[in-house]
Amino acid sequence: MAAEGGGKEMNEIKTQFTTREGVYKLLTHSEYSRPNRVPFNSQGSNPVKVSFVNVNDQSGNGDRICFNVGRELYFYIYKGVRKAADLSKPIDKRIYKGTQPTCHDFNHLTATAESVSLLVGFSAGQVQLIDPIKKETSKLFNEERLIDKTRVTCVKWVPGSESLFLVSHSSGNMYLYNVEHTCGTTAPHYQVLKQGENYSVHTCKSKSTRNPLLKWTVGEGALNEFAFSPDGKFLGCVSQDGFLRVFNFDAVELHGTMKSYFGGLLCVCWSPDGKYIVAGGEDDLVTVWSFLDCRVIARGHGHKSWVSVVAFDHYTTSVEESDPMEFSGSDEDFQDQMIHFGRDRANSTQSRLSKRNSTDSRPVSVTYRFGSVGQDTQLCLWDLTEDILFPHLPLSRTRTHTNVMNATSPPAGATIITNASSNTTNGNNSGANTPGINSLSTTLPRSNSLPHSAGTTTTTTTTTTTTTATTNNTNKASSGGGIGSGIMDSAIATGVSKFATLSLHDRKERHHEKDHKRNHSMGHISSKSSDKLNLLTKTKTDPAKTLGTLLCPRMEDVPLLEPLICKKIAHERLTVLIFLEDCLVTACQEGFICTWARPGKVGLLSSQNQASSPSGTVV
C-alpha cells in the first residue's frame, strides 16, 4: 500500500490505496487527456468535466467518454480497465473560439452506436446540442444570449425524457428547454407560476410555445449544481448562498432546505435509493442530509480545502442480513476484518435497500459508500453506517469511523451533543481497548478541527466530565458482544445527552476565550459563538440566525464522520469523481482523466510496465 503522508512523503501522489474491499490501483495506461499528454495550463479556465455514455455496441466495448479541457472538447472510446487508451484517435474533437465548454451531459435513453445526443454548456451562456458520432451540430440554444448572459454551471437531461433538459447559470437562474422548440428572436417575457421562500418559477409568455418552457430563480448568487433524484421526481440544487434546496420537480414545490456551515455549496448527489443527499462546498465539509426527515444527520471532515465533487458509489453500497460488523483500525486491518463484507453488489442493492427500509426490526444492515474530491487535490472515501442513519436504535458495536454515541433523535430546537463517545483509530479493537480517563478533555469538541486520516492514531472525545466519560467507556466495553445490552446502552446514552445539554451553556462561558482562538480549519472561520458570527457579511439570510437550527446544526450537534481513506492523487485541484462498475474515474484541472481499477479488476493492464507513463500526474 502507498505510504501515508509524512515528512517528505507529504506531497507524494498516491497510485494505490486500500479499503476493506481490497486495493484500488491507478492504471497509468488508461489515462485520458489531450493527445499530446502535456499538462494543461489551467489558470483562469473552467473546470475539467467528464461525461460517460454506453452506446450498446455489439463489440462489448460500448463505453464512450467526453471531456473538456480549456477551449477543447474531446470524445473517445473509453476502454477502462480492459485496454490502454489510444489518444491518437478521438472520435470527435472540437475547439471553440470566444467561449469555453463548462459542462456536458449525454442522453442515455437515445444513445446508439450510430448516434448520441450530447448537450454542452458554455462560459458565455449558450447551450449546444451535438452528435459527436455523426459529427453534426444540430442546435444552439440561447445563441443570442437573450435568455441568460452568464456562465452555464450545470446541464442535464430530464430523467426519462428524450427532449427535455435543464440548464443552470451563475446568475442563479435555471431554465427548462425542449430540443424540439426554438428560442425567440427577442428576450422572453415571463409570468409567475409559483413563488416560495427564496425561489420563484415563471413560465414564458408567448403566442407559440418557445424556449425556455420554465425559468427558476433559486436563492442568491450562482446556482452551482443540481442533481435529479434516482426516480427523477425531485431536484436537489446547491447555491453560492450556502443553501441546499430540494424541489418536487413536477409539482414545482419546495420539499426541504439545508444551510452549509460556512460559504457556498458547490456540489450535490443522491444516494442510490433517494433517501439521502450529500452536499459539499466552501466549508471543506461533506454534509449528509436526510430526504425523509429534512435534516442534517452527519458531517464529514477530511478535506483541507473546498469540496468540488461528491458522488455515491452504487457498487459498494452494501447490505447485510447478519449483525453489523465492527469497523476499526487502519486500511490493512479493514481488509482482514471485512473480507466477506460488501459482496452484494449493484444488482441486488436496490431491492435489498427497499427490504431494509420496509422492516421495522433490524435484520439487515446497510452501509452507503460515497466519495469526494476537492481543491486540496485529495480523494476521500466515506462510509455512512447504521449508527448514523438510525441513531434511535440501540448500537450493537461502536464504529471507529464515526464519532457518535446518540441513542435518541434530538427534538427540534434542542441542543444535544451527539458525538459524546471517545474514539480510537489506532487499529485496535475499539470495544476492548478504550483510551484512559486521563486522555479525556473537558473542553468543547475538538474533533471538528482535526483533519483525520485513516492510519493515524487519534483520540477524539466530546464528553462533558470524567464521570460521563467513564460511563461511555464502560458502555462501549460491555456492548462489544452484541445488542444484548442495547436497552441499557440506550438509557445511558440518553442520560449522557441530557447531561451534556445541561452543561453546554456553562462550558461555553467558561472556555469562551480558549474557543475564540481555536481555528476550525474549514472555511477559515474560528469557532465563535453565534453572536460573534454577526460580524460576517450579511445577506438576507443571516448565518447567525441559521447556525444552531435544524437548517444548520452546530458542529457538536451532529455526528462527525472521518474518511475511510484520504489521499493526495493529483498536482492540481480535482474536478471529477465518477464511480463505474469496475473502476472509479477522477480528473484534475491539468486535464488528466485517471482510471482506478477496483480490487481484482486490473485485468490486462496489470502485466504492462506501469512505470513508462509519459504523464505528469503520476509520481
Image (cartoon, rainbow, N blue to C red):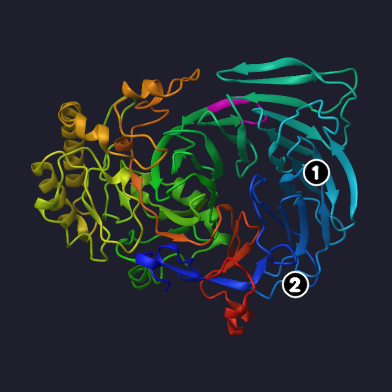
Q: Position of residue 367 (x, y in %)?
A: 43, 55
Q: Residues within 10 Å of mark 1 (few under 14, many from 20)?
A: some
- Give the left or right position of residue 159, taking residue 529 as reference: right
Depth check, mark 2 against mark 1: the one in front is: 2
Q: Position of residue 203 (x, y in %)?
A: 76, 20
Who is closer to the viewer here, 50 or 527?
527
Q: Amino acid at mark 1?
A: Glu
The residue under the point 38% across, 52% down is 385
Report if residue 360 is visible in the image: no
Kindly identify which residue carries mark 1.
162
Q: Amino acid at mark 2?
A: Asp
Figure quadrant of residue 615? bottom right
Q: Position of residue 435 (x, y in %)?
A: 15, 56
Who is closer to the viewer here, 493 or 462?
462
- Give the left or right position of residue 612, taking residue 485 as reference: right
Instruction: Inspect the magenta stretch and tell me whether residue 252 lies in it.
Output: yes
Judged from this view, the residue extending furthest toward the top is 191
In the image, residue 175 sits, relative to residue 116, either above or below, namely above
In the image, residue 76 sits, relative to residue 202, either above or below, namely below
In the image, residue 154 sits, relative to residue 188, either above or below, namely below
Report if residue 344 is visible in the image: yes
The residue under the point 45% across, 22% down is 537
On residue 86, which mark appears?
Answer: 2
Q: Which residues are magenta?
A: 248-255
SS at badge 1: loop
Q: Position of residue 465 (x, y in %)?
A: 11, 40
